[in-house]
């Protein structure tokens, strides 16, 4: 007997602080199965609202949540480092973040100094561990 199944990691929908959906990322096995249609029905309201729905292959879906949170942790770590420099030089970290945020490649989002809570530390460690397992660490970078 063959069984179609799907998983929706991280509750399946990435949301803004105000609850607005940013994107949905179900993962399906096998691809384009009956499950995709059922998930489409379950998420119909957010899809109709224009939320991008991404159905990646299994390997990409496995990396998506951890990679996103690791990237956010990187941005938070960066602006925290800049906050320390600002403190020593008398510069304004909020203004610096605003200046950097005008660069579309950087963006304003996630450029507030502070602690990274929730899944950020766990997902960052997960990405580091997985990269080590796959021997996907750059040779010129320090290994943990």
Image: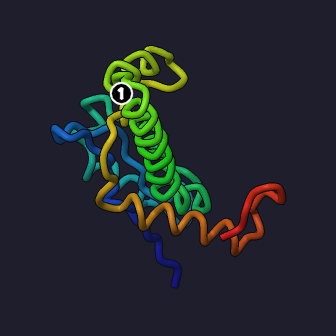
Q: Looking at the image, which residue is at 35% across and 60% down?
A: 10
The image quarter containing residue 112 is top left
Residue situated furthest right in the rendering: 139
Give the camera-side residue of 64 and 94.
94
Percent across and percent down for residue 126 are 52, 68
Residue at 46 percent across and 34 percent down: it is 85
Looking at the picture, how far across and down is residue 13, in whole percent? 31, 49
Q: Which of the image's four quarters has the C terminus? A: bottom right
* Percent position of residue 91, x then y: 38, 22
Q: Residue at x 42, y 55 (%)?
A: 26
**Residue 70 shown left or right of residue 136 in the figure:** left
* Way the structure is coloured: rainbow
- Give the answer, above or below, for where 50 lies relative to 132: above
In this rendering, would 54 be left or right of 141? left
Where disc 1 sits, the SS reads helix
Position of 62 relative to 109 (above/below): below
Residue drawn at point x = 50 percent, y = 26 percent: 106
* Viewer-proximal residue among 60 and 133: 133
The residue lying toward the viewer, choosing from 55 and 138, is 138
Residue 82 vs 120, above or below: the answer is above
How many numbered markers are drawn?
Answer: 1
Q: Which residue is mark 1?
A: 93
């Amino acid at each position: 007997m063959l069984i179609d199944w799907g998983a929706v990691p991280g509750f399946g929908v990435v949301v803004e602080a105000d609850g607005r959906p940013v994107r949905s990322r179900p993962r399906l096995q096998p691809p384009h199965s009956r499950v995709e249609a059922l998930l489409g029905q379950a998420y119909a309201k957010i899809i109709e609202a224009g939320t991008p729905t991404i159905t990646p292959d299994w390997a990409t879906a496995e990396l998506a949540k951890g990679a996103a949170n690791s990237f956010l942790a990187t941005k938070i770590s960066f602006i925290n480092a800049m906050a320390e420099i600002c403190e020593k030089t008398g510069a304004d970290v909020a203004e610096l973040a605003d200046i950097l945020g005008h660069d579309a490649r950087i963006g304003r989002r996630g450029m507030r100094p502070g602690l990274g809570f929730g899944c950020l530390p766990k997902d960052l460690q997960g990405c580091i561990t997985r990269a080590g397992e796959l021997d996907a660490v750059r040779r010129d970078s320090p290994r943990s």
